[in-house]
Image (cartoon, helix red, strand yellow):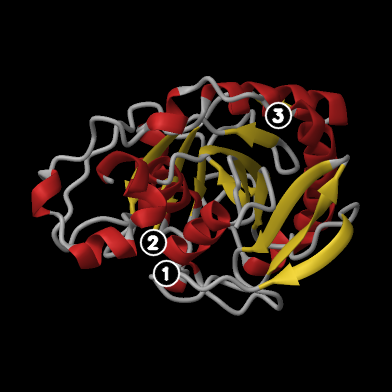
C-alpha cells in the first residue's frame, strides 16, 4: 500500500488537519496492534499526505499508553517517507518563550518501559542514532517555519520524560543543569522507530510553558498549556503548509538505508515467522 509521501503525527491540540483536500479515512492493521486512530489521507499543497492524531481524536490515550510501533508501522505501510511529529513542550530556557517553535535536533531519554523498537524476539538490529533527526528534513522545516512567520529556534535538545505527571521542581532544575532546551512526553520513541523504518523524521516542538523552574512564571498546568495551544496549533498548520511542497526529494540522506549493516542476526537464523512479521522493513535485506 503506497498512498502518501508526507506524514504528520499531531500532538496535543492538533487533532485534524485543515487544508487537507480529498480527505478519506483509512484504518491500518499492524503486527503490533492498532494505531492511535484512523489515518486521514489527502493532499496538502498538492502533496499526498497521511495525518494521524497521536492521542486519538478526543485525546483518549496518555503518553505512556501510546502504541508508537503501530503508529509508525502504519505510516510506513502507507508509503510515508518524510514524517513530522508535532508536539507541545515545556521550555527549559529563558529565551524559548511560550508560543515559540523549536526545530529539535537531539533527544535525551527519561522514559521507562516503553516499546521503542520493532525488533527483538529473535532479530537483533542496532541502527545508528547519533543524529536522531533527518538533516535535510530538519533544514526544510526551519525554512518553512521562518516562511510561516514563526519565532523559530533552529536547534534544541528535547528531554523525553515518562509522564503523565509534570516534573517536580527538583527534576526541572536538574534537567536545566543538563542544558536541555525543551521537555515533552512523546517524540523520542517516534524518532527511534522512524529510523528503524527508514523514514525521515523531524519534530515541530511548540513551547507552551516554562515547566516549573521559572521563578517569575506560573508552574506548568494542563489549563495553562491549553491557553497557549490554540495559537501554537494554528502556527503549526501554517508551517506544515509551507513544508509540504519543499520536502527534500528525492531522498539522499542516510535515513533511507538505516538498516543496511545494522542487522546483526545471521540471515539463516531469522525464523520464517519473523520474516513474515517484519517483511515490510527487512524484506529488501534478507530475501
Q: Which of the 4 image quarters holds residue 20?
A: bottom right
Residues marked 3 and 2 touching at CB (< 8 Å): no
**Relative horizontal placement of residue 128, taking residue 150 as reference (left or right):** left
**What whole-number distance in Å separates the C-alpha atoms at marks 1 and 3?**
31 Å
Closer to us: mark 2 or mark 1? 1
Please determine whether, in this image, residue 107 is positioned above or below residue 179.
below
How many residues crowd around disc 1 within 10 Å: few (fewer than 14), some, or many (20 or more)?
Answer: some
Which part of the image, by quadrant, shows the N terminus?
A: bottom right
Report which residue position mark 3 lands on. 247
Residue at 77% x, 33% y is 243
Of the two numbered discs 1 and 3 on the same chain, state the one appearing first in sequence.
Answer: 1
Whole-percent x and y of residue 276?
Answer: 31, 63
Residue at 44% x, 58% y is 167
How many residues crowd around disc 2 within 10 Å: few (fewer than 14), some, or many (20 or more)?
Answer: some
Report which residue position mark 2 lands on. 162
Q: Which of the 4 image quarters holds residue 81?
A: top right
Please determine whether, in this image, residue 31 is positioned above or below residue 138.
below
**What whole-number distance in Å separates the C-alpha atoms at marks 2 and 1?**
7 Å
**What whole-number distance in Å separates the C-alpha atoms at marks 3 and 2?**
31 Å
Secondary structure at numbered mark 1: helix
Residues marked 2 and 1 touching at CB (< 8 Å): yes
**Relative horizontal placement of residue 181, taking residue 269 as reference (left or right):** right
Report which residue position mark 1 lands on. 64
How many residues crowd around disc 3 within 10 Å: few (fewer than 14), some, or many (20 or more)?
Answer: many
Closer to us: mark 3 or mark 2? 3
Amino acid at each position: 500500500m503506497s498512498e502518501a509521501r508526507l506524514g504528520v503525527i499531531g500532538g496535543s491540540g492538533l487533532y485534524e488537519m485543515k487544508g487537507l483536500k480529498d480527505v478519506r479515512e483509512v484504518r491500518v492493521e499492524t503486527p503490533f496492534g492498532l494505531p492511535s486512530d484512523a489515518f486521514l489521507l489527502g493532499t496538502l499543497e498538492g502533496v499526498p499526505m497521511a495525518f494521524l492524531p497521536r492521542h486519538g481524536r478526543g485525546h483518549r490515550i496518555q503518553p505512556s499508553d501510546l502504541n508508537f510501533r503501530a503508529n509508525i508501522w502504519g505510516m510506513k505501510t502507507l508509503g510515508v517517507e518524510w514524517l513530522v511529529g508535532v508536539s507541545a513542550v515545556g521550555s527549559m530556557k529563558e529565551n524559548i518563550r511560550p508560543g515559540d517553535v523549536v526545530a529539535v535536533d537531539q533527544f535525551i531519554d527519561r522514559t521507562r518501559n516503553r516499546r521503542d523498537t520493532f525488533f527483538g524476539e529473535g532479530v537483533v538490529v542496532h541502527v545508528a542514532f547519533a543524529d536522531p533527526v533527518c538533516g535535510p528534513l530538519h533544514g526544510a522545516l526551519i525554512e518553512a517555519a521562518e516562511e510561516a512567520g514563526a519565532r523559530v529556534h533552529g536547534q534544541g535538545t528535547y528531554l523525553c520524560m515518562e509522564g503523565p505527571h509534570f516534573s517536580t521542581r527538583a527534576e526541572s532544575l536538574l534537567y536545566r543543569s543538563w542544558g536541555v532546551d525543551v521537555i515533552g512526553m512523546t517524540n523520542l520513541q517516534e524518532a527511534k522507530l522512524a529510523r528503524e523504518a527508514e523514514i525521515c523524521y523531524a519534530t515541530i516542538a511548540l513551547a507552551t510553558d516554562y515547566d516549573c523552574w521559572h521563578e517569575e512564571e506560573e508552574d506548568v498546568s494542563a489549563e495553562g498549556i491549553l491557553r497557549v495551544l490554540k495559537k501554537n496549533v494554528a502556527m503549526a498548520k501554517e508551517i506544515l503548509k509551507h513544508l509540504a511542497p519543499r520536502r527534500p526529494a528525492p531522498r539522499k540522506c542516510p535515513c533511507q538505508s538505516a538498516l543496511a549493516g545494522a542487522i546483526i542476526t545471521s540471515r539463516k537464523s531469522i525464523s520464517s515467522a519473523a520474516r513474515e512479521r517484519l517483511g515490510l522493513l527487512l524484506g529488501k535485506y534478507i530475501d
